[in-house]
Image (cartoon, grey):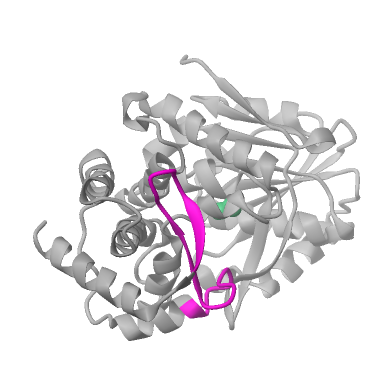
Amino acid sequence: MSEMNEVTINLGDRSYPVLVGRDILHKTASLLPSSARRVAVVTQEGIPAQYIPEFPGLSVSVHTIGVGEDHKSLTTIASLCSQFAQHGLTRSDVVVGVGGGMVTDVAGFAAASYHRGIPVVHVATSLLAMIDAAVGGKTGVNIPEGKNLVGAFWQPSGVVCDLSTLDSLSDRETRCGLGEMAKYHFIVRENLNEIEFDQRVARCIQIKGDIVAADEREGGIRAFLNYGHTLAHALEIDTNFSIAHGEAVALGVLYAAHVAQQMNRISEDRVNQHYQVVHDVYGLRRQLPEGLFIQSLIAAMGRDKKAVDSLTFVLDSVDGLEVVPGITESVLKGAYKDFESRLATV
Ligand code: GLY
């Protein structure tokens, strides 16, 4: 059995461990609060039943949510909370989310809402959930007006990242996780690709954990975790979500490099480093979806819930990432032209 890493998310008396390793699902029970008598497992259609850990001596109920953004809804939260009540879940019991990012977002928000907040433990089974969604306490669901517009900060009591579960991911799910992983190369200036993959997952979680510990409510540097996400969200909206989140992030990271170059914040060499990470290290070579128009993307970027007055981007600079407000349309259009021409050559 390979070694297990334990990353601590330091949040004072709400600190918690993230366990990262292979064949470690059985460790989940050790993360449950000692008061728990009942466990409500929230999982999703398609998640293999063997990923649900065993909880000896506890009364376990399993609640399965549907696949797709339509099920990431307040209706699903209401249904889960009713099911929790029918199972007799109390404040001293626990929710365990078993699945990818959608499951941990939904299970986390149901736990945050039920009885005004009960403990939650996540078992992340996708790369995206391990290095992003399951860690850091952002939970939520969509409403017709936008993605993740209703939610809560609700930190888990612990997270298990069993890397063996990644073996069953589809190519697309893997690419989505790798798109999120690529952004970490620019959040820290480390040669992450020199770190062996399992250790790199733990390192990304540590990077995220350090940022969350410093800025839990995203008043400042937590925004760096959204590197590449401004265009990514617009791409998701304008393609009606036919492009998956992590795939869009990979494109968004490259576009952010062109925006930074347009503003003379970074050199051409640094733009090339972005392509090297996204295309060569992670093999995320893809064209923009057909039929997109920059004007419509700009409008969608403007509706991004993270937009403060005018358009705000997280951009690279010689000193690292910064949150940059007031990006003009002409910069965005110039960068998009550079981006399209560059993609046409690869
Ligand atoms: N997914 C970005 C964050 O957790 O802040």
Boundaries of the magenta span = 302-325
Question: Quick check: can you spot residue 30?
Answer: yes
Depicted 15 relative to depicted 89: above or below? above
Residue shown at the point (41%, 47%) measured from the top left = 183
* Residue at the farthest left position: 345
Q: Position of residue 264 (x, y in %)?
A: 31, 59
In front: 190, or 71? Answer: 190
Q: Quadrant of residue 106?
A: bottom right
Depicted 298 relative to depicted 5: above or below? below
Q: Position of residue 54 (x, y in %)?
A: 67, 32
Q: Position of residue 27 (x, y in %)?
A: 65, 25
Depicted 236 relative to depicted 58: above or below? below
Q: Position of residue 225 (x, y in %)?
A: 52, 50
Whether the magenta-drawn stretch holds residue 314 is answered as yes
Question: Quick check: can you spot residue 169?
Answer: no
Q: How many marks?
A: 0
* Residue at the farthest front position: 264
Determine whether, in the image, residue 333 is placed left or right of residue 31: left
Residue shown at the point (80%, 38%) measured from the top left = 14
In front: 31, or 50? Answer: 31
Residue shown at the point (38%, 63%) measured from the top left = 244
Determine whether, in the image, residue 139 is placed left or right of residue 133: right
Q: Quadrant of the C terminus?
A: bottom left
Whether the magenta-drawn stretch holds residue 138 is answered as no
Depicted 136 relative to depicted 326: above or below? above
Residue shown at the point (39%, 40%) measured from the top left = 185
